[in-house]
Image: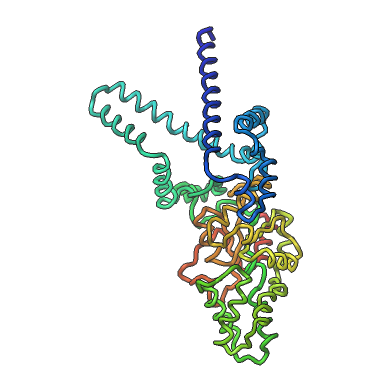
């Protein structure tokens, strides 16, 4: 390499570093001009002024902006990017967990775009001024003018929604059936076929569970309470459960199972049941005695030998503590609606859960198998989000399907009638 080339490279590298420095200073300054207080946002509006002041001091927000920028720059140069305010994880660790996907995306983009760019450039040079040259110029300029997010959205609509070649929101592993000649023909037309199993069960790393209805027999628990407080009531079990489901469809629902107090007051008069605040609160508190399904405890012990187990329940945290105790505490991570600040089928719950297990263990969405009985709250939305699903059809041969009408059933990746069947398949190595 001659001296001129060395000077050119050194100049380009210097300009690149100067650009990074100027951009970081500009972004840092603009961030400081934004309205609001980072400490106040981290602690919430209910935080005391003393707590906000203490956190501002901890973050260094009470120092002049130039001094804060100099400290930040010094930490960045030494590899210290600080900690995330959302989950207290080191920023460097969060970046490292996502960097492989970013590099893969950049590599694939380069692999596709560079040959196309060279081909277009060569054709334009070879046929300069021709109709082909003008057509290529129009196409390339039009493509550059279209916002990238719009192109990405169109790509998702075509390849994920219409053609179903790829998942919409996640990176998937290559289906194992590609390795088998007898299935290769079926897999080639669709890289990630909807309704086809893309991995062996033993390849997953983390199982996320719906709890109420999948692991805990809430219907039996409710009926036990009904029979205890109204032993002479002339109402069938099915009528009581139907009235309960109807009450839960109301727009007045609150967080579950606190909402059971309201539900009792709604259904008791129509069914001729005793109604008082004490009885209604007892209905809510009866969750502490709701039983597990006969196979739940033993199956969870068997599954825990192979996977990390995570709850994703629509129940509040106080109720989840009772459910976890009933199930003999098999979970590595317990997530409730209080943690996610929403309930399934809200997609934000799934995003929150993924962020938690990815931040703690480094597992990706492709490592996750979501196990649930509810089509409405879990299976349908999971499939839409590109999450591999396992339907435990607890209500097999019964009316209904976990709050979902029959016509709305989504075909899962795996389908069992009990949790024990899932554990059997895992231990069989399938």
Asked whether the viewer can see residue 203, the reply is no
The colour scheme is rainbow
Please give left or right for residue 182 compared with residue 123 in the image: right
Q: Residue at x 68, y 89 (%)?
A: 231
Give percent across and percent down for residue 48.
67, 53
Q: Quadrant of residue 197?
A: bottom right
Quadrant (top left/top right/bottom left/bottom right) for the N terminus: top right
73 and 89: which is toward the camera: 73
Give percent across and percent down for residue 347.
53, 57
- 430 to 286, vertically: above or below: above
Q: Residue at x 66, y 58 (%)?
A: 335
Total number of numbered discs in the rendering: 0
Give percent across and percent down for residue 316.
65, 65
Quadrant (top left/top right/bottom left/bottom right) for the C terminus: bottom right
Q: Quadrant of residue 28?
A: top right
Asked whether the viewer can see residue 422, the reply is yes
Q: Residue at x 54, y 11 (%)?
A: 6
């Amino acid at each position: 390499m001659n001296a001129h080339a060395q000077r050119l490279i050194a100049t380009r590298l210097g300009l690149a570093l100067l650009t990074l420095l100027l951009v970081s200073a500009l972004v840092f300054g603009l961030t400081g001009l934004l309205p609001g207080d980072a400490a106040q946002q981290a602690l919430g509006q209910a935080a005391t002024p003393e707590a906000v002041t203490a956190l501002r001091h901890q973050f260094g927000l009470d120092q002049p902006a130039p001094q804060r920028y100099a400290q930040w720059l010094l930490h960045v140069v030494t590899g210290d990017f600080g900690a995330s305010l959302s989950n207290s994880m080191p920023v460097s660790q969060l970046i490292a967990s996502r960097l492989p996907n970013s590099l893969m995306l950049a590599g694939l983009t380069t692999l596709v775009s560079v040959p196309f760019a060279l081909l277009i450039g060569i054709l334009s040079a070879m046929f300069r001024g021709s109709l082909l040259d003008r057509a290529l110029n129009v196409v390339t300029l039009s493509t550059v003018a279209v916002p990238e997010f719009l192109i990405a959205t169109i790509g998702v609509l075509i390849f994920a929604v219409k053609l179903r070649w790829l998942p919409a929101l996640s990176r998937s592993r290559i289906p194992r059936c590609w390795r088998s000649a007898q299935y290769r023909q079926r897999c080639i037309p669709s890289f990630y076929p909807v309704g086809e199993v893309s991995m062996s069960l033993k390849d997953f790393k983390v199982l996320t569970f719906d709890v109420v209805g999948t692991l805990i027999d809430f219907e039996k628990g409710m009926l036990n309470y009904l029979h205890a407080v109204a032993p002479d009531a002339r109402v069938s079990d099915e009528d009581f459960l139907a009235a309960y489901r109807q009450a839960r469809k109301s727009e007045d629902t609150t967080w579950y199972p606190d909402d059971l107090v309201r539900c009792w007051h709604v259904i008791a008069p129509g069914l001729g049941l005793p109604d008082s605040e004490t009885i209604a609160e007892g209905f809510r508190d009866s969750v502490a005695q709701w039983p597990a399904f006969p196979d739940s405890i033993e199956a969870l012990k068997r599954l825990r030998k192979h996977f990390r187990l995570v709850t994703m329940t629509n129940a509040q945290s106080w109720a989840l503590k009772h459910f976890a105790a009933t199930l003999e505490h098999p979970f590595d991570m317990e997530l409730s609606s209080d943690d996610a600040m929403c309930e399934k089928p809200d997609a934000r719950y799934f995003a929150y859960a993924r962020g938690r297990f990815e931040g703690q263990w480094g597992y990706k969405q492709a490592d996750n198998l979501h196990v649930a009985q509810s089509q409405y709250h879990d299976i349908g939305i999971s499939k839409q989000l590109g999450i591999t699903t396992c339907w435990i059809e607890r209500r097999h041969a019964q009316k209904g399907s976990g709050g979902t009408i029959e016509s709305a059933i989504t075909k899962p990746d795996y389908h069992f009638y009990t949790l024990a069947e899932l554990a059997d398949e895992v231990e069989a190595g399938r």
